[in-house]
Amino acid sequence: MKPRVSVIVAARDAGDTLEATLASIRAQTFTDWEVVLVDDGSNDGTGEIARTAIDRMRVVRHEVAQGPGASRNRAVREARGELVAILDADDVWYPSYLESQLAAYDQAIVEGRRVGAVCCDADLLGPDGPTGTRWSQRVGGAQAADITTMLHENVVFTSVLCPRSVFQELGGYEEDERIHLEDYDLWLRMIERGWEIVMNHETLAVYRLGAAARSSKVERMATGGSMIMTRALERGALTAAQRRLARKRRRMYEVVRRRAKIAAEPGPVRRAVAMARAAPAIVLSVLEHPERWGHWLREGPRSAGERRHAG
């Protein structure tokens, strides 16, 4: 008999966090699930940990790492459930995650809504322990995930519940690793195609933040964000106002990328010259996005980031 939910986990070298992640699946109050985990070329025994952790687990291995987008897509192709639930290999769910997400999904379907995904809130766990804040606070406390809101900010926490048929219709996650923010790209495409992202405001997960971002990581994320805005513009589904917003957001990504490259320049003189050349673009972006720059200059774009696959 097919399970109602297939839990999708993509993992690369996740040995130090995976046991806690899988334990949080076993603790779910809703029990009609399976787990499909893709071991994406790990060298630390990730696959072996997974195979012994859960009875209802199928492990698929990529001998050569293919990236989080390709790994999640592979897991969904292997899945049998009506719905898929995405869980990163370094996050954990609270026991009521599946029960609450399914209740929100079922209620939205009863109301006749065209549900593409159900997202939730999450507590943030930093390198030194709980931060005392939630995902929703980090991204501005949005009440809806419409296209304009999403062009301002990716407000959707990565651990969503999604009909497998919708995921397949959209072609899944982008597999080009330059995107780096493949979940953000998927949410935008989902909304453009007329699917609703239902916001379940319950705090149902713990999101593990990495250490402070290096310039190279910020540059990759900003490059991916710029690509996402370019692709959204090229698809032609945005209104004139939304196109202006996407271009403004792309300018911000480009300035963040440029600033990260400047930070990596060898020697103070070269950095000073490069910063002087970039100053007009930086000033324009600061004026366009005054509320963002404190966070961006410290940590880079808000995203699942460079974590243990996926995100």
Image (tube, grey):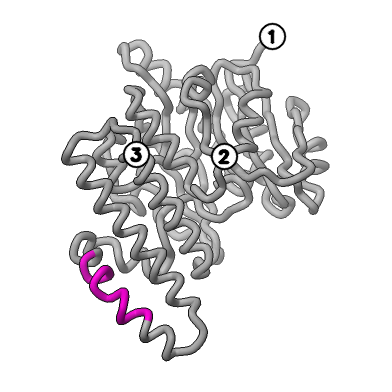
Residue 195: quadrant of the picture: top left
Looking at the picture, tell me which residue is in the foreground, 184 or 21. 184
Which of 202/261 is in front?
A: 261
Please identify the quarter of the rendering in which residue 74 is found. Answer: top right
Q: CA distance from mark 3 to mark 1?
A: 40 Å
Out of 111 and 299, give the one closest to the viewer.
299
What residue range appears in magenta? 274-284
Q: Position of residue 67 (x, y in %)?
A: 63, 45
Dominant secondary-structure state across the stretch colored magenta:
helix
Residue displayed at 64% across by 16% down: 3
Q: Is residue 175 left or right of residue 151?
A: right
**Residue to which mark 3 is pinned:** 232
Point 49% across, 88% down: residue? 267
Q: Is residue 167 above or below residue 259?
A: above
Q: Is residue 55 above or below residue 185?
A: above
Q: Which mark is residue 175?
A: 2
- For the residue pair 64 and 128, the one nearer the viewer reads as 64
At 47% across and 25% down in the image, what residue appears? Answer: 170
Q: Are marks 2 and 3 in contact (CB under 8 Å)?
A: no
